Amino acid sequence: MAKLYPENFIDKLNKMEPKEETVNFLLNYSKALSVINCNKLKFEALLN
């Protein structure tokens, strides 16, 4: 297989960290998300 990425790409990939605002957004979204099971259907509701 052809070499598609530079050698230091994997090192940079391992050092990547998300911003704090990204983590907070995902946590808040997951707290507001509600999944309702009705028979064999699933309904997703975003509670604001």
Image: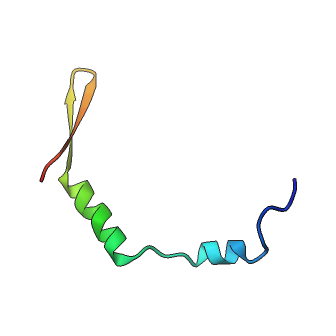
x%, y% of residue 34?
A: 19, 44
Looking at the image, how many numbered discs can be counted on the residues?
A: 0
x%, y% of residue 18?
A: 44, 73
In the picture, measured across the screen, residue 48 lies left or right of residue 35, that is: left
Depth check: 4 or 38 in front? 4
In the picture, measured across the screen, residue 48 lies left or right of residue 4, that is: left
Depth check: 12 or 37 in front? 12
Position above or below: 5 against 34 = below
Q: Which residue is outermost to the right?
A: 1
In the figure, residue 8 lies in which quadrant?
bottom right
Position above or below: 14 against 29 = below
> Which residue does the image show at 21% across and 57% down from the upper left?
31
Q: Which residue is outermost to the left?
A: 48
> Which residue does the image show at 84% across and 62% down from the upper left?
3
x%, y% of residue 28?
A: 23, 62
x%, y% of residue 5?
A: 76, 66
